[in-house]
Image (tube, grey):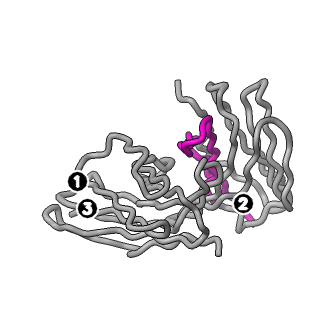
Amino acid sequence: QKEVEQDPGPLSVPEGAIVSLNCTYSNSAFQYFMWYRQYSRKGPELLMYTYSSGNKEDGRFTAQVDKSSKYISLFIRDSQPSDSATYLCAMSANSWGKLQFGAGTQVVVTP
Amino acid sequence: DTEVTQTPKHLVMGMTNKKSLKCEQHMGHRAMYWYKQKAKKPPELMFVYSYEKLSINESVPSRFSPECPNSSLLNLHLHALQPEDSALYLCASSQVGGREQFFGPGTRLTVL
């Protein structure tokens, strides 16, 4: 079993819809949770960072962490075609900066 | 400045060549990373430098040789690579502690 599970998709939504992404994990030591967006043939871009459980909002993006269920989510409101990309969850348990990535979910927002 | 830069953007090399990838950041970060990413896969950690010293080597073959000349620069020296080493090579940096890592655009490497 992988430490971090993420559905690779693709997830196709119409423009303006809410995109809902999630990851589950098995290592209860994970405390730091991140979402990255990666466009084709580009480097990952950090979107959201959260520590421990709770919600965090930044513009159209909301990240949620539920440590009791070992489940994290990312919601994108009012999705745009420019949101079409692969979204990677990542998490870390320790101070050495070793991130455990999910497989990435490919999102396609159709006009 | 929140940018990590990488050169070159693309590199094609033969199995007998020696080449180097370069990474630079000016965010004052003292941790820097090399990752390898194959198509439709997440990044895989290769090396971590903390305060210019190698702190993590993820059992990477010796044909990959990292170097951190100073706190802003990170190099990856390549020698006698195999075609299966073709991938996107990503550099990242962070504060020591490594929570929020900022990635560069990557170098797309093709080994013939």
Q: Is residue A67 above or below residue A96?
A: above
Q: Which residue is identified by label 2? A: A109
Left or right of A14 on screen, residue B3? left
Left or right of A63 on screen, residue A37? left
Please, what is the three-letter code of the amino acid marked with disc 1?
A: Arg
Task: Tell me the mark number nearer the camera, choosing from 2 and 3.
Answer: 3
Q: Provide the secondary structure element on which disc 2 rests.
A: strand
Q: Provide the secondary structure element on which disc 3 rests.
A: strand
- State the residue in front, B5 or A86: B5
Instruction: Please tell me whether residue A32 belongs to the stretch shown in magenta.
Output: no
Q: Which chain is indicated by disc 1?
A: B
Q: Which chain is indicated by disc 3?
A: B
**Residue B108: x %, y % from top left:** 39, 66
Please, what is the three-letter code of the amino acid marked with disc 3?
A: Leu
Please, what is the three-letter code of the amino acid marked with disc 2?
A: Val
| Residue B63 image label | 1
- State the residue in front, A44 or B19: B19
Q: Which residue is identified by label 3? A: B78
Q: Earlier in the sequence, mark 1 or mark 3?
A: 1
- State the residue in front, A12 or B13: B13
**Residue B67: x %, y % from top left:** 34, 61
Label 1 close to label 3 by CB (< 8 Å): yes
Which residue range is magenta in the image? A85-111
Left or right of A51 on screen, residue A4? left
**Residue A43: x %, y % from top left:** 54, 63
